[in-house]
Amino acid sequence: MDRRDGCSDEAGLVFFTVAGFSFFIREGARIRANMGEGCIFRLQTNTTNMTRLRSLLLLLLFPFCTLHAQKIDTAWLSAAGQLFDVAFTPAEKDSMVDGVTDNQRIYQKMHQQNLPNSQPYSLGFRPAPPGYAIPVKQLPVAWHLPVGTTLPANRNDLAFYTVAELASLVKTKKISSVELTRFFLDRLKKWGDTLQCVVTLTEDLALQQARQADEEIKKGIYKGPLHGIPYGLKDLFAVKGFKTTWGAAPYKDQVIDEDAFVYQQLKKAGAVLCAKLTLGALASGDNWFGGKTKNPWNINVGSSGSSAGPASAVSAGLLPFAIGTETWGSIVSPSHTCGVTGLRPTFGSISRSGAMVLSWSLDKAGPICRSAEDDAIVFYYLKGTDGKDGDAVNRAFNYTGKVNFKKLRIAYAGNYFKQIPKTMEQWAVIDVLKKAGADIKEVTFPDSTIYPFNIMRLIIGAETAAAFDPMTRSDQDDLLTWQRKVDWPNGFRVSRIIPAAEYVNANRYRYSLMLALNDFMKQYDVIVLPTYAGNQLAMTNLTGHPVVCVPIGMNANGRPNSITFMGNLYDEATILAVAKAYQDASGFVKRHPDKFSN
């Protein structure tokens, strides 16, 4: 690896190589040199005598040069054994040397190849346990658009109409798709910089798609409630002719000649792409190469992430809906923070082809909308596969939006709720559902009893490190904006040390978790969970269960709070219907940040 940061051809700059190590030295500048994998040498100097400095470096580097050239031996294997929590006898270590050395040669040959992020791996993940029947019979879904929806006296109020309300206006020709699209494009231009939520405005494409929608509707061809409705994509989904930056500086000019499956699905539904929206760099947090995406309820703080732009834009009324992704909280967290409704579907419900890979066995795409019913509409048109994602399936989504509380088995996680004061908004959710007719039981959610250690760290760590191994090896990780211990660059390096055997065994424990959580869920249709309680966010991502995160009010700090409804595998219809019933009864879904009312 070659690290040549902060150097130029100006006077006083010297480049030389010592025992295979490259140096750039500038008078009075910090010296940084690469001394093997992960070993960085730094020295601050004020000397102008470069010859003496060069000699000094030779002396300093001699031990490192010797170590770097050292072959794998039994002492090396003893140190490795300590790291991997395994002890070998002297005889075992002696026998291992040749095999480990041979493996190293294989690694080196592999590293000479370039594996693109889009290259699949042969191991698949299916959340359904043995004997679990994936529902495949799709029944007709009747979308009951609100009758009598009218244009608001104050046109700015359109910004906070639901997808269903906007669809009613477009279908009845009270507003054209072009008019609606220009309205949201103007809002994106006005507020996008304030929130730092837009990477690319796709204005020409949007107007072209809007005109096409209007022509089709004029001819009596109505494709459904997304026809002519503007939206945004998290900028890890590829769209031909546009940059797909992944939110990261090394890829800020990247153009991928592919249309992601989710974009194709929404295009078929007649939706109008207005913008590619921000994500935290490589799908982590809300910091991207252009800044930090803001929370519309308080622009002095971040939106959370990694689906930062989608949640921020929908919350502020810059778009009616957007598409995000989640690996471990990236739909749930910004939805909670920005006060919007995010659906994380069952793993494998939506093909991820054309999307950045972070973790093959954990990545999921899903809608971020204003309401649960909007989530249902968007998910219906998103679900499915193109055969390019080995983990994706064609499955049914038989949503009605109707709830028979007398038949539903609903429970709340008492062990989590007991940690929350009775005055908190989460308890009020239970009261609202009870008043609506729900018979809600208190249960103990099986947290540490079936999830005794953090296997998520090993699984997500190993997969993300593999997905971005070429970036780490080429030192492009140095270009990422954030370089703290908790950020991806360091995380990728740390995870390179996870043994393959431990990754495999972590997934075997994961299988036990899947069986145990499914056995628990057989007793219930819906579990009500405080969004960040315990380990449930990691557990349900590992098992692939669906959740919908719903805003429920404002906390003491004046920021949105949320509740999570968890359902059985492939049963998004039930949790969305319960979430809709709650939103219809509580009314919080109608609230929005005052700053963005105009």
Image (spheres, rainbow, N blue to C red):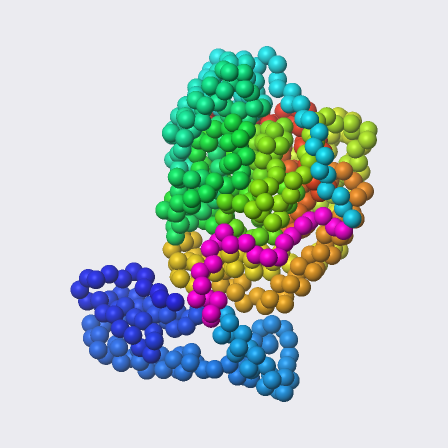
Q: Position of residue 398 (x, y in %)?
A: 70, 31
Q: Position of residue 306 (x, y in %)?
A: 51, 45
- Between 425 and 320, the residue placed more toward the observer is 320
Residue 171 against residue 391 in the figure, above or below: above
Image quarter where the C terminus lies is top left
Residue 253 against residue 461 in the figure, above or below: above
Residue that appears at 51% across and 74% down? 104
Q: Quadrant of residue 171?
A: top right
Residue 75 against residue 129 in the figure, above or below: below
Q: Residue furthest left?
A: 11
Q: Quadrant of residue 78?
A: bottom right
Residue that appears at 40% across and 50% down? 251
Tell me if 575 is positioned left or right of 309 in this view: right
First to last magenta residue range? 108-130
Q: Position of residue 391 (x, y in %)?
A: 62, 48
Tell me if 399 is positioned left or right of 16 in this view: right
Image quarter where the N terminus lies is bottom left
Kindly report the secondary structure that dominates the magenta region of the rendered protein: loop
Residue 308 visible in the current orientation: no
Residue that appears at 61% across and 34% down? 379
